[in-house]
Image (cartoon, helix red, strand yellow):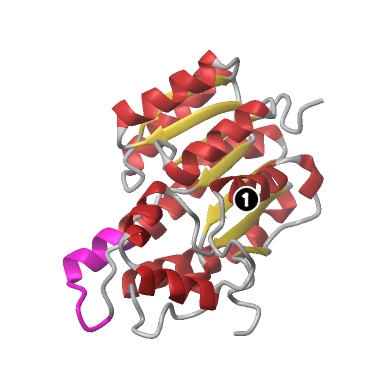
Amino acid sequence: MARLDGKVAIITGAAGGMGLTMAQTFAEEGAKVVAADIQFELLQEGVNEINTKGGDALALKLDVSSPDEWKSAIDETVKKYGKIDVLVNNAAIQIGKSVKEATLEEWNKVLAINATSVFLGMQTVIPKMQENGKGSIINMSSIGAIVGGGPDGYDVAYSASKGAVRSMTKHAAKVLAKDNIRVNSVHPGVINTPMVESSLKDNPELRETIEANFPLPPHLGDPKDLAYMVLFLASDESKFATGSEFVVDGGATSTK
């Protein structure tokens, strides 16, 4: 029996990278997957591949910072599959600027996509999960919510937004426990997506820094490493876990 048989899951930021890997993994484990992203054409390619391999997935265009689009996405999911068991708030962006450099416009954009979207997603899906009598919400945070980033601070808005996700998760877990809705956060380190690999290709100093700070070989996580953690939290195997932080970082925070 597959680990997500009978479950309906929404995954945001699913057009590529970690989100697409999660969608593929969920489908392989029997879930009906609603893959959502603002990059719809790229998203549809990934969903077509899932369905060609025997999965059951639906592509939905979603601006995660829009309350109206969240409502439409939830309504479309229920119309198609009848319920929602799992929500993975994965969509996020980075600007790579410290507190000395970031503009207010950049700050607001990152907070809207990385943090406000999590608030909107949870708030919109909660009534549907209450109707089910249970649910699992998985919010993608970061080790940037636990530590301050690299020596130069790296990305003030990203760290702040992921810190907000960390706190919101604990708040929601406490509020929703009586409804049997579990809410947990996942905190990745550096995951070897195509974007990361591209940035490392001609930057040996950055690779050395990563190897020094992420001690477990091969120092970079595979998207599948993250997908398996999220799969556990989506499944009934984690039925007694809520309000917790699950770190997948190759040991980076073990000495902090």
Answer whether residue 146 is visible to the viewer in this image. no
The residue located at (36%, 44%) in the rendering is 64
**Quadrant in which residue 14 is drawn:** top left
The residue located at (64%, 35%) in the rendering is 85
Locate residue 181, reporting x and y percent. Answer: 68, 47
How many numbered marks are there? Answer: 1
Q: From the viewer's perspective, tell me whether residue 189 is left or right of residue 194.
A: right
Q: Is residue 250 above or below residue 53?
A: below
Magenta span includes 18: no
Answer whether residue 82 is visible to the viewer in this image. yes
Badge 1: residue crowd in 10 Å (few <14, some 14–19, many ≥20): some
Our reading of the magenta stretch's main secondary structure is helix
Looking at the rendering, the stretch of residues picked out in magenta corresponds to 99-111
Q: Is residue 175 above or below residue 56?
A: below
Quarter of the rendering occupied by the C terminus? bottom right
Q: Is residue 178 above or below residue 101?
A: above
The residue located at (56%, 41%) in the rendering is 87
Q: Residue at label 1? A: 225
Amino acid type, mark 1: Asp
